[in-house]
């Protein structure tokens, strides 16, 4: 009987820990999703501004070259590419 009680206690403890981890994973995911959406909006604004000067494609291609190196975030790559062309 004591063994079953100990197993039940351990099972409840594991379940509690799993619930905490699942909740934390959901919380961690939410800000990243929002940040990505904001970054995408910023990238689109950069491309629209570049388009006003006829440089949309050039900025896009330059940013994609920066992204191949995996050094910059997408937003950073587009900002740098924009500044390079508009500089």
Image (spheres, grey):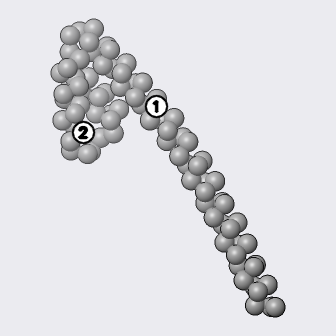
Residue appearing at x 63%, y 53% in the figure: 23
Mark 1 sits on what residue?
37
Q: Callout 1: few (<14), some (14-19), or many (20+) C-alpha neighbours within 10 Å?
A: few
Mark 2 sits on what residue?
67
Would you place residue 26 above or below residue 37 in this image? below
Find numbered disc 1 in the image and state the secondary structure of the residue it sits on: helix
Of the two numbered discs 1 and 2 in the rendering, the one whose residue sits closer to the viewer: 1
- Quarter of the rendering occupied by the N terminus: bottom right
Question: Is residue 58 shown to the viewer in this render?
Answer: yes
**Residue situated furthest right in the rendering:** 1
Relative to residue 78, is residue 2 drawn left or right? right
Relative to residue 43, is residue 14 drawn left or right? right
Residue appearing at x 54%, y 40% in the figure: 31
Question: Is residue 85 shown to the viewer in this render?
Answer: no
Residue appearing at x 22%, y 23% in the figure: 59
Percent of width and height locating residue 35: 48, 35
> 36 or 79: nearer the eye?
36
Q: Which mark is residue 70?
A: none
Label whose residue precedes the other's in the sequence (1 or 2):
1
Percent of width and height locating residue 44: 36, 21
- Quarter of the rendering occupied by the C terminus: top left
Would you place residue 55 above or below residue 30 in this image? above
Query: In 3D space, how far apart are the residues under numbered discs 1 and 2 (Cα atoms)?
Result: 18 Å
Find numbered disc 2 in the image and state the secondary structure of the residue it sits on: helix
Percent of width and height locating residue 52: 27, 8
Which quadrant holds residue 62? top left
Report if the CB atoms under discs 1 and 2 are less than 8 Å apart: no
Q: Callout 2: few (<14), some (14-19), or many (20+) C-alpha neighbours within 10 Å?
A: some
Residue appearing at x 33%, y 20% in the figure: 46
Would you place residue 45 above or below residue 77 in this image? above
């Amino acid at each position: 009987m004591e063994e079953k009680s100990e197993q039940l206690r351990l099972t409840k403890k594991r379940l509690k820990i799993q619930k905490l981890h699942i909740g934390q994973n959901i919380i961690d995911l939410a800000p990243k999703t929002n940040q990505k959406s904001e970054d995408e909006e910023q990238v689109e604004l950069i491309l629209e501004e570049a388009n006003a000067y006829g440089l949309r494609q050039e900025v896009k291609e330059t940013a994609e070259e920066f992204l191949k190196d995996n050094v910059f975030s997408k937003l950073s790559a587009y900002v740098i590419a924009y500044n390079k062309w508009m500089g």
